[in-house]
């Protein structure tokens, strides 16, 4: 399994950080028949609709919208990517780690300082897990998913369904939170 680094880093980080999640993450088992050619494991979040999943792999994480009417073996199961938390880790001659993606964007913006990390795990935790935590915690009862023929996006209620229906190839719009314990 090639996502061993991601899985181990996630497990270690979660021991100290699980309580920070508004919606508790949990791992789902992929069917034995599923061909996991991209080497990832999958998370869902308690209180968030099952159409939202997180694919974790050594290169980062992606938030996907999925078609629950299908299963993992169906080509059309994955509907769209809502968010990506990716990094390209590089090591300096001094043994520090940094993200090459961030350095590229810093260069584009004229920023000269990059953030350096003592370990690859620390870089991954900051760029993937902390960003995932922020994104998940930003969801609330006003967040909806608009489904279209060629994609999906997040919208704010009450304009969510009205605005979504005006777009071409509209399918449906659903609330992201399935229990309203956050009410914020």
Image (spheres, grey):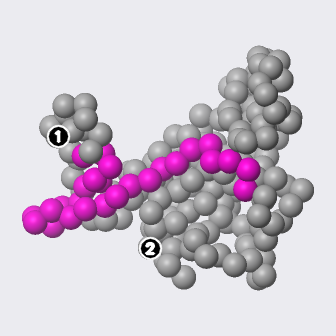
Instruction: Name the residue at 63% across, 56% down.
Output: 54
Residue 132 position, x and y percent, is 53, 48
* Rendered view: 126 above or below 7: above
- Residue 65 numbered tag: none
Q: Where, quadrant-wise, is the C terminus in this rendering?
A: top right
Depth check: 15 or 67 in front? 67
Q: Is residue 39 left or right of residue 91?
A: right
The extreme left residue here reads 94
Instruction: Locate residue 78, reporting x and y percent.
Output: 73, 56
Q: Nearer the viewer, residue 22 or 139?
A: 139
Relative image position of residue 55 (x, y in whole percent): 61, 60
Relative to 10, 103 lies left or right? left
Whole-number angstrom distance, CA of label 2 to CA of label 1: 27 Å
Q: Which residues are magenta?
A: 78-103
Q: Earlier in the sequence, mark 2 or mark 1?
A: 2
Q: Quadrant of the N terminus?
A: bottom right
Asked if residue 85 is among those painted magenta in the image, a careful observer would answer yes
How many numbered marks are there?
A: 2
Under circle 2, the secondary element is: helix
| Residue position for label 2 | 5
How many residues crowd mark 2 within 10 Å: few (<14), some (14–19), many (20+)?
Answer: some
Please provide percent x and percent y for residue 17.
50, 54
Mark 1 surroundings within 10 Å by alpha-carbon count, few (fewer than 14), some (14 through 19), many (20 or more):
few
Among the 4 quarters of the image, the one containing residue 94 = bottom left
Q: Residue at x 27, y 45 (%)?
A: 104
| Quadrant assignment, res 118 | bottom left
**Residue that mark 1 sits on:** 113
Residue farthest toward the front in the current orientation of the protein: 168
> 154 above or below 101?
above
Is 119 contained in the magenta span?
no
Q: Is the Cβ of the residue at disc 2 closer than 8 Å to that at disc 1? A: no
- The answer to whether residue 67 is seen in the rendering is yes
């Amino acid at each position: 399994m090639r996502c061993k680094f991601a899985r181990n880093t996630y497990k270690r980080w979660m021991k100290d950080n699980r309580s920070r999640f508004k919606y508790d993450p949990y791992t789902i088992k992929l069917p034995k028949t599923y061909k996991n050619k991209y080497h990832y494991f999958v998370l869902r979040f308690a209180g968030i609709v099952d159409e939202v999943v997180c694919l974790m792999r050594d290169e980062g994480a992606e938030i996907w919208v999925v078609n629950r009417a299908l299963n993992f073996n169906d080509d059309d199961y994955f509907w769209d990517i809502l968010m990506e938390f990716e990094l390209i880790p590089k090591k300096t001659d001094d043994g520090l780690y940094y993200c090459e993606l961030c350095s590229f964007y810093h260069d584009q913006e004229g920023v000269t300082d990059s953030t350096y990390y003592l370990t690859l795990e620390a870089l991954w935790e900051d760029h993937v897990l902390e960003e995932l935590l922020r994104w998940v915690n930003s969801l609330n009862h006003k967040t909806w998913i608009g489904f279209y023929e060629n994609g999906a996006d997040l919208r704010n209620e009450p304009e969510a369904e009205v605005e979504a229906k005006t777009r071409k190839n509209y399918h449906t719009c659903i609330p992201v939170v399935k229990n309203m314990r956050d009410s914020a």
